């Protein structure tokens, strides 16, 4: 009995911290989403589904934020995975200065978002930014855009920054997966006369699937709770073009409507759980077969 | 098992996200706690190097741009005289309200906190009856402009000290040489304003410098002309306050937004309005690429100080011309100073307020702050130049309160109105949509505040 309890003794402190600082506040957050919690009243009252009704029926901007969040998540998962995989394949090969390339490609992931925001606001500046200046210099003035302030481009530009920042991190995880694949598979494939594409399709990708599952779930969670990239680059604008759930939560908290804010986060939590469940299920099926 | 563990992990991570929400009230003040630590260390340093008379540090939380350099100089003088050190904790303006509310709610308010005066802010927002010290019996109250005292009072008690420029309404500041070169005179109506803009645009100069990227500045165009709305629709403010009228149904408000939108669609704000910044106003106005901007009367002096070779006398003024406005808008609500009830140094904070409001110190503040032209206290010698005097002589006859102060639940949604107006500039929203959103947010706030007019 005592021996069986040993593992629980070891995790007891960590579990206590997890319960106190994660589980309890989470449950409080869910409860508060059913209340009129705001900065003007001293007593919090239970109001049922009123906050959810506000989100789903009275203001299409909330739905716009949820839609943008999902689009952002899907786009960044796809792009970061493809680019991360290509980078991992590249640095996994015997290219020159392999370690140097790995460090350079990983570096954007460790730059603080505030710094990234300042850098890219400058790069994207329509008058003096690097992109438009370069386009003008090579005679492509008609290609210049208002990258962060034109509703056609703002969201794409934000996604591009996030992909630039995150692809190196995905590369590192996938690189670890690639290095765990035994060379004997490739040698056998070489003997069978398989080409690059067939080796990728039938050896690399299936054996990389556990790593891809990890990166997909991480990207999914990161994408759905995106805030910092949007906040520092556009603050949800122009207008509501790049608004995501968390910029709306920020706005609700600024208005003192904490109940609606927590309801928005709870909606995101539900979406996150459902999408995460299906992502894991789908990826597990791929892993198995 | 693996799947179960994965789901557990996923739920845990998502839960972590939610927990941020549950803890939100307590973790919104990283800068402040950092500053607090720095305050302590600064206080210890001061104690070890100077013969401190009281060895006290008063923490002072304020939004960006509320504390002027001359006030900081005065604080140094105050410290020399009394040994009381003022530790300024400056928070970016877009986050200030959240930080302050979190600190007040958690009982961790600094000794002195800055806040906008105005009935709504003092009551529902700051709950001054519980959070701020009653200052009604302070000597300076008798010398402060009664209009400002009114806005810093709640239930007949004065809770804040306001030291601000009463003439700092938002008005159009124009480049006189550009107007003269094009043979333009100061527009007296919206139609004349449109004609002037068209002529300026045709000359290759952008008519209006508008920094939309800051999120708050372009909002000014709408509520600042409250006095004109009242002229055109008498009693509208009262009807909006008591909820017998909606923003959505007020045609003057819709027309005003439509005119603003027209200026944008005609290209008078130029190509770069969405990336222009408020901080670059002086530089851009001095460069002559823009002919006008919405600012207050101190801008020319700021331009002269910020950009070598530029002259304050090159700039003139006229009221915001939407809806043919020819009146001066007054906002007696302004950044103010409150003493926290949780402060252990209330008397020292009062002493600081008394020091700031000494006649010579007020005059020093005015004389050394380019943004101010006068102050809201008796017997102050203003520093209006001829251009400014002429402006007040011409337009100062009819004045009224701006809508963000006159109508409750408008000021707290300032940034949201800004987002809506930016969406309108991008043709994503109509003026009517903006007004409907204002009504929705007002209703939400009024109901949560338990406003009897919304029951």
Image (cartoon, coloured by chain):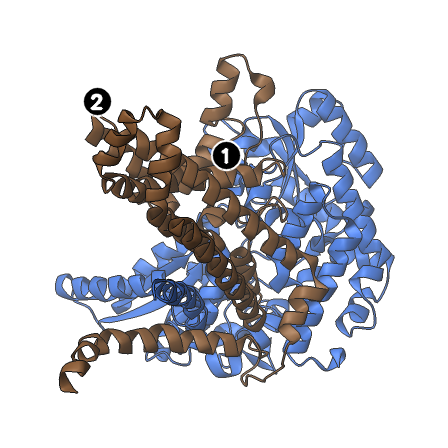
Left or right: B92 with respect to B156?
A: left
Q: Position of residue B449 (x, y in %)?
A: 63, 78
* Helix, strand or loop status at disc 1: helix
Q: In what quadrant of the picture does the N terminus of chain B appear? A: bottom left
* Helix, strand or loop status at disc 2: loop
Q: Is residue B326 visible?
A: no
Q: Is residue A217 above or below residue A32?
A: above
Q: In what quadrant of the picture does the C terminus of chain B appear? A: bottom right
Image colour assigned to chain B: blue
> Residue at point 18% right, 81% down?
A4
Image colour assigned to chain A: brown
Whether discs 2 and 1 lie on one chain: the answer is: no
Q: Is residue A279 above or below residue B386?
A: below
Give yes or no for contact between labels 2 and 1 (Cβ–Cβ under 8 Å): no
Q: What number is the disc on residue B304?
A: 1
**The numbered mark 2 sits on a residue in which chain?**
A
Q: Quadrant of residue B178?
A: top right
Q: Is residue B218 visible?
A: yes
| Crowding near the residue tagged with mark 1, few <14, some 14–19, many ≥20 C-alpha atoms within 10 Å | some
Q: Position of residue B185 (x, y in %)?
A: 76, 31
Q: What number is the disc on residue A96?
A: 2
Q: Nearer the viewer, residue B59 or B240?
A: B240
**The numbered mark 1 sits on a residue in which chain?**
B
């Amino acid at each position: 009995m005592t021996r069986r309890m040993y593992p629980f003794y070891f995790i007891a402190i960590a579990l206590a911290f997890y319960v106190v600082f994660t589980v309890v506040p989470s449950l409080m957050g869910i409860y508060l989403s059913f209340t009129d919690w705001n900065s003007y009243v001293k007593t919090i009252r239970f109001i049922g589904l009123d906050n959810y009704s506000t989100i789903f029926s009275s203001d299409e901007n909330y739905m716009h934020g949820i839609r943008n969040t999902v689009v952002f998540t899907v786009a960044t998962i796809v792009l970061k995975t493809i680019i991360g995989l290509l980078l991992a394949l590249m640095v996994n090969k015997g290219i020159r200065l392999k370690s140097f390339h790995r460090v350079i490609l990983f570096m954007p992931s460790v730059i603080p978002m505030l710094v990234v925001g300042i850098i890219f606001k400058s790069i994207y500046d329509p008058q003096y930014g690097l992109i438009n200046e370069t386009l003008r210099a090579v005679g492509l003035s008609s290609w210049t855009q208002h990258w962060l302030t034109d509703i056609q481009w703002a969201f794409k530009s934000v996604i591009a920054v996030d992909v630039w920042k995150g692809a190196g991190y995905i590369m590192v995880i996938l690189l670890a997966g690639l290095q765990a694949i035994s060379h004997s598979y490739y040698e056998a494939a070489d003997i069978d006369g398989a080409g690059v594409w067939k080796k990728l399709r039938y050896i690399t990708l299936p054996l990389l699937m556990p790593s891809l599952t990890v990166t997909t779930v991480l990207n999914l969670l990161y994408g759905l709770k995106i805030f910092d990239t949007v906040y520092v680059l556009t603050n949800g604008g122009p207008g509501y073009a790049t608004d995501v759930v968390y910029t709306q939560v920020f706005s609700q908290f600024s208005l003192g409507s904490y109940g609606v804010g927590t309801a928005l986060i709870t909606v995101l939590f539900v979406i996150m759980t459902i999408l995460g469940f299906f992502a894991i299920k789908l990826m597990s099926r791929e892993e198995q077969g | 098992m693996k799947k179960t563990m994965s789901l557990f992990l996923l739920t845990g991570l998502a839960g972590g996200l939610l927990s941020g929400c549950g803890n939100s009230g307590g973790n919104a003040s990283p800068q402040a706690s950092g500053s607090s630590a720095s305050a302590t260390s600064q206080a210890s340093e001061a104690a070890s190097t100077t013969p401190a008379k009281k060895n006290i540090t008063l923490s002072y939380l304020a939004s960006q741009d509320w504390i002027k350099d001359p006030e900081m100089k005065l604080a140094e003088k105050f410290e020399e005289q009394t040994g009381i050190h003022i530790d300024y904790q400056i928070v970016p303006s877009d986050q200030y309200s959240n930080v302050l509310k979190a600190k007040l709610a958690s009982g961790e308010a600094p000794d002195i906190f800055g806040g906008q005066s105005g009935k709504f802010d003092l009551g529902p927002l700051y709950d001054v009856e519980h959070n701020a010290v009653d200052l009604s019996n302070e000597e300076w109250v008798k010398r402060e402009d009664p209009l400002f005292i009114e806005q810093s009072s709640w239930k007949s008690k004065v809770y804040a000290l306001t030291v601000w420029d009463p003439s700092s309404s938002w008005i159009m500041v124009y480049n006189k040489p550009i107007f003269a070169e094009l043979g333009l005179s100061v527009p007296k109506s919206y139609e004349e304003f449109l004609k002037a803009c068209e002529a300026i645009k045709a000359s290759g100069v952008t008519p209006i410098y508008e920094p939309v990227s800051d999120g708050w500045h372009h909002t000014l165009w709408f509520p600042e002309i409250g006095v004109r709305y009242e002229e055109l629709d008498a009693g509208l403010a009262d009807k909006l306050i008591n909820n017998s009228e909606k923003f959505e149904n007020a045609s003057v408000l819709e027309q005003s937004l439509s005119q603003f939108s027209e200026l944008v669609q005609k290209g008078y704000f130029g190509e770069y309005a969405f990336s222009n910044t408020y901080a670059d106003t002086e530089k851009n106005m001095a460069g002559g690429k823009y002919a006008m901007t919405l600012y207050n009367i101190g801008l020319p002096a700021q331009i002269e100080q910020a950009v070598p070779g530029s002259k304050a006398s090159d700039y003139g003024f006229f009221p915001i011309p939407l809806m043919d406005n020819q009146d001066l808008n007054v906002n007696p609500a302004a950044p103010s100073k409150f003493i926290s009830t949780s402060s252990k140094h209330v008397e020292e904070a009062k002493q600081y307020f008394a020091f700031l409001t000494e006649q010579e110190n007020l005059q020093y503040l005015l004389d050394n702050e380019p943004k101010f032209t006068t102050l809201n206290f008796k017997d102050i010698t203003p520093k209006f130049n001829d251009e400014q005097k002429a402006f007040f002589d011409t337009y100062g006859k009819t004045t009224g309160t701006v809508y963000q102060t006159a109508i409750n639940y408008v000021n707290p949604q300032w940034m949201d109105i800004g987002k809506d107006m930016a969406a309108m500039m991008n043709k994503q929203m109509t003026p009517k949509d903006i007004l409907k959103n204002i009504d929705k947010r007002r209703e939400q706030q009024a109901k949560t505040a338990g406003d009897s007019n919304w029951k």
